Amino acid sequence: MILPDGYSDVPAGKVAAIVTHLEMTARPTPRPDPADAWSLRRIEMPPLDWFRDLYRRVGEEWLWFSRLRMPPAELAAILHSPLVEVYALEREGRDEGLVELDFRDAGQCELVFFGVTAKLVGSGAGRWLMNRALELAWSRPVDRVWVHTCTFDHPAALAFYQRSGFRPFRRQVEIADDPRLDGTAPRDVARHVPIIE
C-alpha cells in the first residue's frame, strides 16, 4: 500500500515510526576505537530470560518491543539457530550492550539488534561495539551487511549507522499496537512518543 502525500491518520492505540533500512556492500575502514574498558562475549544458546532482560535494558526507552511480544518457541528458534549469533558487551562483570547477527540469508548478514544501555550512551562503547560487530559480520563470506533503524530509536542512531559506513536504501512506515497499552512496556517509557488512547 502506498500512503498518499500529506498526513495519514494513525488510529488511537497505535504507534507509527518511519523505518530506514541501511546497508554496506564492502568492509568499511574501522573507525578509531576509544580507550576500551569493555569486553565482548558470545552467548551460545542465549537463555530467553537473559536475552529479554538485556533487550529491555538497551531498547525499552526507544520502544523496542518486537522480541517481547514474540512467543517463546519462536524467539528460541531464532536465537538458537546455528546461523544467528548473539553477543554481549560486558563492563565490570555486567552485560551492557547487545549485538544480534543473522546469517540465515546466504551471502548477507543482518545486524538485527544493536545497542548499549543508557549508562553507556555517549561513552564510546557504541562505536567500540560497532567495530566488533562489523569485524564479526565481515569475517564470514558475505557481500552485504544491513540494518534498520526507526524514528523511535535514539535520535543519533541513524547518523551513527551512516558514520559507521552504512548507506540508506529503503524507507517504510511501521504501524503497531502501542506496547505501553497492553503491558509489554511500562507506560512511562519513550516519552518522545506520546500515548494516544
Image (cartoon, helix red, strand yellow):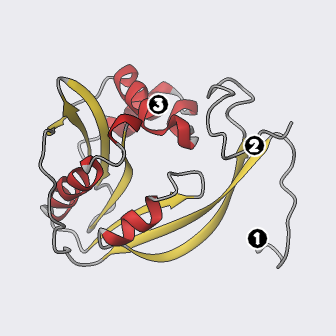
Q: Residue at x 59, y 51 (%)?
A: 152
Rendered image: mark on residue 194: 2
Q: Is residue 64 visible?
A: no
- Mark 2 and mark 3: span between their CA atoms? 19 Å
The residue singled out by tag 3 in the image is 56
Upstream in the sequence, badge 2 or badge 3?
A: 3
User: At which x and y percent is residue 65?
Assistant: 56, 37
The residue singled out by tag 1 in the image is 1
Mark 2 residue element: loop
Q: Is residue 143 left or right of residue 185?
A: left
The image quarter in which residue 41 lies: top left
Upstream in the sequence, badge 2 or badge 1?
A: 1
Q: In the rendered structure, which amino acid carries the disc numbered 2?
A: Pro
Camera-side residue of 114 and 70? 114
Mark 3 residue element: helix
Camera-side residue of 163 and 104? 163
The image quarter in which residue 195 lies: top right
Q: Residue at x 83, y 77 (%)?
A: 4
Q: In the rendered structure, which amino acid carries the disc numbered 3?
A: Arg
- Mark 1 and mark 3: span between their CA atoms? 32 Å
- Density class for disc 1 (Cα within 10 Å; few <14, some 14-19, many ≥20) is few
Q: Is residue 188 visible?
A: yes
User: At which x and y percent is residue 29?
Assistant: 16, 74
